[in-house]
Image: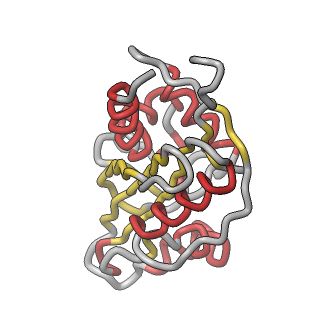
Amino acid sequence: MSPEQKPLIFVTGNANKLREVKAILSSGGDPVEIDSKELDIPEVQGTTQEVALAKCKRAAELLGGPCITEDTALCFTALNGLPGPYIKYFLNELGHEGLNTLLDGFPTRSAHALCTFAYCAGPGSEPVLFEGKTDGKIVPARGLPTFGWDAVFEPEEGGGLTYAEMKSEDKNKISHRYRALEKLRAYLQTLPH
């Protein structure tokens, strides 16, 4: 890294997210080192993509340099994709049990986890989006309830385990976040160093 080049900042105040992102980006070939900073950025209402673009553009302005932001959605098939990007608010108000209750009476409990990372080169630049998706279903909470809705999401590729029941290194091989970060990593490798 040249002296005038600023480090890539991941804008988050979520310690679990930061730990997961660092683990994924530092592993394998072409490791990406990041720093983190918590910023108070109001979230616009809209699609996952609209939220991610607005958040990243504002973060780059506040930081005066390159950054990445992340937005996660949990989309219930029976509810036409809701709660989607509003999952944090649904979880805070309803808890794990309430998320399950939302689907009572519907013919499917299928869902997908969607992660959208946005990269912005700096103020005035248009952010670039990277999405990852993992299909699964909503189940009664199993595993440690320490990371958002992980205890109620059972990915199709998880061998019958919820994200919360999986070892972090196993989750990090199939998660929506991993899939988005692999696309981001590939993009970052194309940028001049």
Q: Is residue 83 above or below residue 118?
A: below
Residue 62 at x, y = what percent? 68, 55
Q: Tell me the quarter of the picture where residue 34 sits.
A: top right
Residue furthest left as drawn: 107
How many numbered callouts? 0
Q: Which quadrant would the C terminus be assigned to in this image?
A: top left
Q: Nearer the viewer, residue 145 or 35?
A: 35
Q: Nearer the viewer, residue 9 or 140?
A: 9
Question: Which residue is painted at 42% across and 56% down in the image?
Answer: 126
Q: Nearer the viewer, residue 29 or 5?
A: 5
Residue furthest bottom as drawn: 105
Question: Which residue is painted at 36% across and 71% down in the image?
Answer: 76
Asked whether residue 142 is in view, the answer is no
Q: Is residue 102 above or below residue 141?
A: below
Residue 166 lies left or right of residue 187; in this view the side is right
Residue 125 at x, y = what percent? 46, 53
Residue 55 at x, y = what percent? 55, 62
Q: Which quadrant would the N terminus be assigned to in this image?
A: top right
Question: Which residue is painted at 46% across and 62% down in the image?
Answer: 53
Question: Which residue is painted at 52% across and 21% down in the image?
Answer: 26
Asked whether residue 103 is in view, the answer is yes
Residue furthest top as drawn: 29
Q: Is residue 150 above or below residue 108?
A: above
Colour treatment of the image: secondary structure
Q: Nearer the viewer, residue 96 or 28?
A: 28
Q: Is residue 78 above or below residue 21?
A: below
Residue 23 lies left or right of residue 184; in this view the side is right
